[in-house]
Amino acid sequence: MTLSKQEKSSKSYFLNTEKALNYDIRNQVMQLFSSSSQTTSIEKEIDKILNDFSEDFLNTIDTNTSIDLDSLLGNFFESQIPVQPIDFESYLKCLGNNVVAHSIHTSSPQFIGHMTSALPSFVRPLAKLMTAMNQNVVKIETAKALSFCEREALAMLHRLIYNFSDNFYGQHIQNNLSTLGILVSGGTVANITALWCARNAILGAKDEFLGVEKEGLAAALDFYGYKGAVIIGSDLMHYSFDKAADLMGIGTQSLIRIPTDSNNRVDIQALRQAVVECRAQNLLIVAIVGIAGTTDSGGVDSLFDIADIAQEAQVHFHVDAAWGGPLIFSEQHRHKLAGIERADSVTIDGHKQLYLPMGIGMVFLRDPHLATAIEKQASYTMRKGSFDLGKRALEGSRPGMALFLHAGLNLIGLKGYEFLIDEGIRKTEYMADRICTMPEFELLAKPNTNLLVYRYIPEPFRELVIKNQLTEIDNQLINKFNECLQKLQRQIGHTFISRTTKSITSFGKEIPILALRAVIANPLTQEEDIDAVLNDQIQIAAKISL
C-alpha cells in the first residue's frame, strides 16, 4: 500500500510531534532529579512558597477551619493520574487551597485535645536534610553512619531508663550482637515488637523442637504443655495490644483486662489473682503489661508492684510508656515511674513528649540479647554478623528518623526535657484547679500526669452533682450534652478538646460517662489559653438546649 503525499506529511507531523512531546517529558522528569543551577533556582522558589505556607500555618491560633467534611472531601475525588507532569505553581496552589488551608493546627496553643503539639524549630531544616540524604536504615549499606547514630541515641534513653554501668554501655552500645533498643514507626509497632520478642524467647528452640518462629504457635504450646496463651494488663491497655494478640495468633479474647481503680491504675490484687488463675488453667502468660500514662487519662500503674508479680511468676514484664515515659527526665515526677527500671521491655513514643515528628516509636530491652529471638536474615541483606538494623525489627525499609531523636536529645538535653515535662504537669494542675472553682464543670479524676478528664454540667444538674444524687438518666442527658459540646467546639474551630468514655459507680452500678479530655503538652500553651478553652466551652454550651 502506497501512502499519498498528504498521508506521509500527516504521519511525519505526528511522529515529530510525538518525538517532541517525549523529549519535553524527558527534560521535565530529568530536571526533577538534577542538581543543576536551573533546578536549584526552581527549588529555591518552591522553598519560598512552602516556607510561606509553613509560617502562615504555624502562626494561626484557631485549631481548625469551619468547613464541614462533606464539602472538604469533594475536593478529593480525582481517580486518574495526570498524563502530563503538572507545573509546580499549579500544584502548590492546589495543595495550599485544598490541603494546607484545611489541616488541623496541632501546634496551636489552644489545641489541647490530643497527644500532638508544636515541634521545636530545628525539626524543619533537619527534615529537609533527612529527605535529601534519603538513608534506608534497614541496612548498613544504605545507612552507614546513621546506623551508629541511631544506636547511640537509643543507648542514651536506655541508660535513662535502666541506668546500667559505664562498662555495660561500653560493651553493648555498638556491639552488633547486642540490641538495646529498636526504633520503629510508632508506639503500636513498639508494643507488638516487645510481645513478639517475649513470645519467641519463652517458646524458643529446645531439644528436637525448632521454636515457635519455625513451627508455629500451636506446635509450640503443645510441645511446652500449655493449653493456651494470654497477655495480662489493665482494662485501659492501648488497642495496640488487641492488634498484638491478633497477629501473634492467641486471639483478642486471650487479652485479659484487669479492672482499674478511680485513679486509673490497675487493681494489683486482681492482677495477682489473674496470674494465679492462669497458672491453674495451664495457660502461658506471654507478658504482663504495665501502663505509664494511659491514653485516655494519663494514669500510671504501680509499676513496682507489677514488677514484683512478674518476677515471682517469671513472666516477661512490659511497660507501655508511650505517653508517660519521658517523666524519667524529671527529678520532680520520675518517682511516678518507680519500677520501670525492672521492666524487660519499655515502649516510648518520640512524637509525644519527646516533641519529635510522627514516625518515631521505640522499644527498649533490658536484656541486650533478647531481640535475637526475632532475628531474621536474607542473603542479599541483613546478613548474620552485620550491623544491619533491619534484622532485629518488624519493619524493613524505613527512613532515618533517628536523626530527629539524636538531635532532640542533644539540642533539648536532659534539663530541657525536664523543663517541658514539669511545665506540662504544672499547667495541667492549673487547669484542674480552675475547673474545681467553676460551677459549670466537674473534674472526673485528679491528674497524675498532664492529661485531664472532666465534663460540663448543665445548670439544672449542678445541685445534684454537689449532692451526688445524679440518676442514670441524668448522666445519659449530660453525656449527650457533652458530646454535642465537643463536636460543636471542634466544628467552630477556635479551640479544641477531645473526648473519651469513663465509668463511675453510682447506686451500685457501673455507668458510662462521656468525658472531655485535655492534653497539656504543647510548650506554647499558657494559662490564658487554658482559660480561653474553658470560656469557649461555656459560650458554646449556652447555645445548646437539653
Image (tube, rainbow, N blue to C red):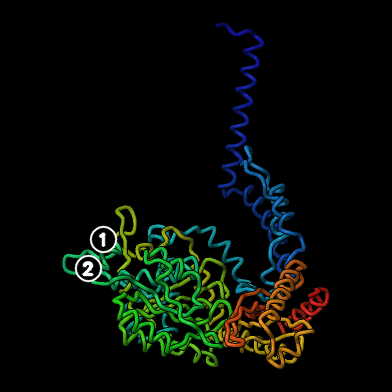
User: Circle 2 — which element?
Assistant: helix
Q: Is residue 278 above or below residue 73?
A: below
User: Circle 1 — which element?
Assistant: helix
Task: Find residue 242 and report its horizontal and vertical position in percent.
Answer: 46, 68
The answer to whether marks 1 and 2 mark residues whose Cβ atoms lie closer than 8 Å is yes
Which quadrant of the structure image shows residue 141? bottom left
Q: Is residue 66 left or right of residue 253?
A: right
The quadrant in which the C terminus is found is bottom right
Residue 29 in sight here: yes
Task: Find residue 308 and report its horizontal and vertical position in percent.
Answer: 36, 89
How many angstroms separate mark 1 from mark 2 (CA)?
Answer: 10 Å
Q: Nearer the viewer, residue 282 or 36?
A: 282
According to the picture, the residue beneath numbered tag 2 turns out to be 223
Q: Earlier in the sequence, mark 1 or mark 2?
A: 1
Q: Is residue 436 above or below residue 393?
A: below
Task: Find residue 382 and report its horizontal and vertical position in percent.
Answer: 33, 59
Q: Nearer the viewer, residue 381 or 62?
A: 62
**Residue lying furthest left:** 207
Q: Residue at x 23, y 72 (%)?
A: 225
Q: Nearer the viewer, residue 78 or 253?
A: 253
Q: Say which mark, if any, is on residue 172.
A: none
In this rendering, which labeled residue sits more in front, label 1 or label 2?
A: 2
Residue 59 in sight here: no
Which quadrant of the structure image shows residue 46? bottom right
According to the picture, the residue beneath numbered tag 1 turns out to be 215
Name the amino acid type tagged 1: Glu
Q: Nearer the viewer, residue 437 or 31?
A: 437
Name the amino acid type tagged 2: Phe
Q: Is residue 349 left or right of residue 536?
A: left
Q: Residue at x 30, y 64 (%)?
A: 217
Task: Find residue 197 and report its horizontal and vertical position in percent.
Answer: 35, 70
